[in-house]
């Protein structure tokens, strides 16, 4: 046999081996998030956060992790403590068109799993406050305006003069009535709203104006609603697809751009599309992204930071068994600054009341910032005659007989309570206001309301579930 043919044989075998290897590699199940554990997903998010990818690249990557995920219209709710919808707060195993977009957005903005979970609540709920009344139900009317901290509405920018406008009346009252809910305590009034959309006929000529990662609402004909479906637009080289959790396909799929538009265009129910885009610079400082119920960590301002006076003596040790909420009882609107106020309270407790230290273990200002007070392991004091042994005393600055606690304060209070309930193995259902233990107005009726209606306990419980 001539020498050359031996090399040809070897080469052929090498090519065959390489081909076999490639096929094996392709047949390996793709690491999809709906089949991965929380630890695996956490590891993956941390890896991605180290890459210098654009928002569009992250949206492409994370959305691909849900290709094939089973579709389920009812897959996520307000969690097990909710009043109305007790489906899980997070479900990565099944997905619908809205949760798909929300989850991908939250992942794209996150550095690790808990971060992702926190951000997801801010995308799904007005100010991150979990509940049926605060959930961003309507894509165009609720969800888009509530997410202006991370999204821009770009339909007019894309479509220019080809855009059309629609005006409709959005009614939460009707929405909830349709769900058989008639006892929502606080509800938005009916709102007349206008949106821009791009009719299908014009859409095909604007393909080049769309960005990969754009979030798309399929606009429908009708009276009381704008959006029928939510999708992501993904561009890879020459290919443009809509990536979406499809009810008819029963899973998350890629639908080629022109093909999909032609299909929906044939249905007179649909009019066109509206577009949203992740901001280049996320407004992390806006109210809705920073002070949610799920603010990941509570770092109290330490005693030296507010220049506390030293304790006059060592306190009596105790074992914490419950949490009691107080207010300072003096109306407070921010002046003087909280550190001065807290120092004033300490001085009063030490000098006038002859106490060893400030009465409370923690204090919360108007911004929801937490301050460390008397060491937790020492029994606190109160102005009244009950024995606070075993109680963790948290004081909210202000007089809540007259003023109302704001959302940042409640969020911090819930977060602090959750931290402490976990540390001391306390059931958050046992949280009390000072007035439940003795004759006093403290912590004021407007703060006590949050305890009486169970809302504060619910927030703390929810948070604990995700911290364990
Ligand atoms: Zn009190």
Image (cartoon, rainbow, N blue to C red):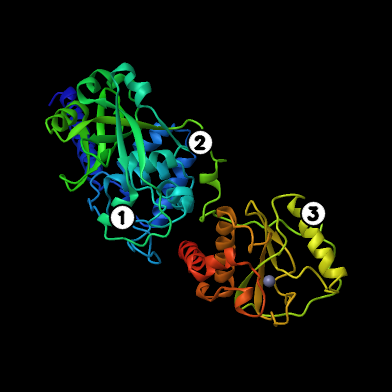
Q: CA distance from mark 1 to mark 3?
A: 46 Å
Tell me the quarter of the picture where residue 80 sits: bottom left
Left or right of 351 in this view: 87: left
Q: Secondary structure at mark 2?
A: loop
Of badges 1 and 3, the one in the foreground is 1
> Which residue is depicted at the point 38% across and 62% down?
79
Secondary-structure class at tag 3? helix
The numbered dot on residue 176 is 1
Residue drawn at 58 percent across, 63 percent down: 446
- Secondary structure, mark 1, is helix
Residue 305 appears in view: no
Residue count near mark 2 (Cα–Cα under 10 Å), binned few <14, some 14–19, many ≥20: some
The tag earlier along the polypeptide, 1 or 3, is 1
Find residue 218 and report its image quarter.
top left
Looking at the picture, does residue 438 appear above or below residue 163?
below
- Closer to the camera: disc 2 or disc 1? 1
Residue 172 x, y percent position in the rendering: 34, 49
**138 in relation to 450, above or below:** above
Of the numbered discs 2 and 3, the one sitting upstream in the chain is 2
Q: Left of 300 or right of it: where is 230?
A: left
Report the residue marked by disc 3.
Answer: 340
Label 2 or label 3, whichever lies nearer to me, is 3
The count of marks equals 3
Q: Position of residue 422 (x, y in %)?
A: 55, 70
Residue 105 versus residue 362: which sits nearer the camera?
A: 362
Q: In the image, ligand 1 is in what quadrant?
A: bottom right
Q: Is mark 3 within 8 Å of ligand 1?
A: no
Between 353 and 256, the one lying in front of the other is 353
Identify the mark nearer the N-term, 2 or 1.
1
The x, y position of residue 98, in whole percent, is: 31, 45
Q: Circle 2 is placed at which residue position?
A: 282
């Amino acid at each position: 046999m001539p020498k050359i043919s031996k090399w040809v044989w070897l080469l052929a075998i090498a090519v065959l081996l390489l081909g076999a290897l490639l096929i094996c590699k392709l047949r390996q199940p793709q690491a999809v998030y709906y089949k991965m554990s929380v630890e695996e997903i956490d590891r993956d998010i941390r890896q991605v956060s180290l890459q210098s990818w654009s928002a569009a690249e992250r949206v492409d990557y994370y959305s691909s992790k849900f290709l094939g995920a089973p579709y389920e219209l009812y897959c996520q709710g307000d969690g097990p403590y909710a009043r109305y919808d007790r489906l899980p707060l997070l479900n990565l195993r099944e997905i619908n068109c809205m949760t798909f977009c929300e989850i991908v957005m939250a992942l794209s903005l996150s550095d690790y799993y808990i971060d992702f979970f926190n951000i997801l609540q801010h995308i799904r709920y007005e100010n991150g406050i979990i509940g049926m009344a605060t959930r961003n139900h309507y894509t165009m009317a609720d969800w888009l305006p509530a997410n202006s901290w991370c999204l821009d509405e770009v339909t007019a920018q894309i479509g220019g003069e080809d855009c059309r406008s629609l005006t409709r009346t959005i009614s939460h009252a009707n929405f909830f009535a349709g769900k058989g809910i008639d006892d929502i305590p606080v509800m938005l009034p009916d709102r007349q709203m206008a949106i821009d959309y791009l009719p299908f006929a014009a859409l095909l000529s604007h393909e080049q104006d769309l960005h990969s990662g754009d979030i798309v609402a399929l606009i429908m004909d009708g009276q009381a609603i704008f959006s029928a479906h939510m999708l992501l637009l993904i561009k890879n080289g020459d290919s443009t697809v809509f990536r979406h959790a499809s009810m008819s396909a029963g899973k998350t799929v890629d639908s080629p751009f022109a093909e999909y538009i032609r299909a929906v265009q044939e249905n007179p129910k649909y009019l066109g599309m509206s577009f949203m885009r992740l901001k280049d610079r996320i407004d992390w400082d806006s109210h809705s992204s920073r002070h949610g119920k799920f603010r990941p960590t509570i770092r109290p301002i330490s005693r030296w930071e507010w220049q506390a006076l030293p304790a006059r003596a060592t306190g009596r040790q105790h074992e914490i068994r419950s949490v009691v909420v107080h207010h300072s009882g003096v109306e407070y609107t921010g002046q003087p600054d909280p550190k001065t106020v807290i120092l004033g309270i300490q001085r009063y407790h030490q000098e006038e009341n002859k106490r060893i230290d400030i009465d409370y273990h923690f204090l919360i200002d108007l911004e929801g910032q937490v301050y460390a007070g008397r060491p937790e392991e020492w029994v606190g004091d109160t102005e009244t005659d009950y024995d606070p042994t075993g109680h963790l005393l948290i004081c909210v600055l202000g007089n809540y007989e007259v003023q109302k606690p704001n959302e940042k304060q409640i969020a911090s209070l819930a977060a602090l309570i959750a931290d402490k309930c976990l540390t001391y193995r306390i059931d958050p259902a046992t949280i009390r206001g000072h007035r439940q233990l003795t004759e006093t107005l403290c912590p004021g009726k407007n703060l006590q309301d949050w305890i009486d209606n169970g809302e504060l306990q619910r927030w703390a419980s929810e948070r604990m579930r995700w911290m364990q």
